């Protein structure tokens, strides 16, 4: 299993108005495509107004958590 990180832009907010710009969501999955599927099903479809609301996705090798001072918003895992 691999870790993938999804980050947000300056204008991305949850349905309840929480700004997500300084957070990330971690998805542990077997592939990037599976991570996107899990992210859309378990995060954006529940917390945001559209399933494709994120800025960038990263692999574990190229993710720099220090750019996201609020840390991990949610951890999702493939079953």
Image: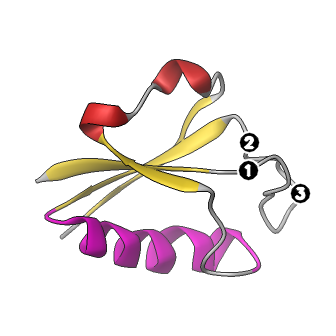
The image quarter in which residue 36 lies: bottom left
Q: Secondary structure at mark 2?
A: loop
Q: Secondary structure at mark 3?
A: loop
Q: Nearer the viewer, residue 3 or 73?
A: 3
Q: Which residue is mark 3?
A: 17
Could you say where residue 23 lies in the image, as x and y percent from the top left? 63, 39
**Alpha-carbon neighbours of circle 2 within 10 Å: few (<14), some, or many (≥20)?**
some
- Nearer-N-terminus badge (1/3): 1
- Nearer-N-terminus badge (2/1): 1
Determine the residue positioned at 61% across, 77% down.
Answer: 52
Query: What number is the disc on residue 42?
Result: none
Tell me if 35 is positioned left or right of 65 in this view: left
Q: Is residue 69 above or below residue 44?
A: above
**Alpha-carbon neighbours of circle 3 within 10 Å: few (<14), some, or many (≥20)?**
few
Determine the residue positioned at 48% across, 25% down.
Answer: 65
Q: Which SS type dominates the magenta stretch?
A: helix
Separation (CA) of disc 3 from disc 2: 12 Å
Q: Are marks 2 and 1 in contact (CB under 8 Å)?
A: yes
Mark whose residue sits in front, 1 or 3: 1
Q: Is residue 18 above or below residue 72?
A: below
Q: Which residue is mark 1?
A: 9
Residue range highlighted in magenta: 30-49
Tell me if 54 is positioned left or right of 13 in this view: left
Could you say where residue 13 lies in the image, as x and y percent from the top left? 81, 57
Mark whose residue sits in front, 3 or 2: 2
Q: Nearer the viewer, residue 67 or 72?
A: 67
Q: Which residue is mark 2?
A: 21
């Amino acid at each position: 299993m691999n870790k993938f990180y999804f980050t947000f832009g300056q204008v991305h907010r949850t349905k309840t108005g929480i700004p997500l710009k300084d957070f990330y969501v971690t998805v542990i999955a077997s592939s990037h495509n599976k991570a996107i599927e899990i992210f859309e099903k378990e995060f954006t479809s529940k917390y945001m107004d559209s399933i494709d609301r994120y800025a960038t996705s990263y692999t574990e090798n190229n993710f720099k958590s220090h750019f996201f001072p609020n840390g991990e918003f949610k951890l999702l895992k493939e079953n």
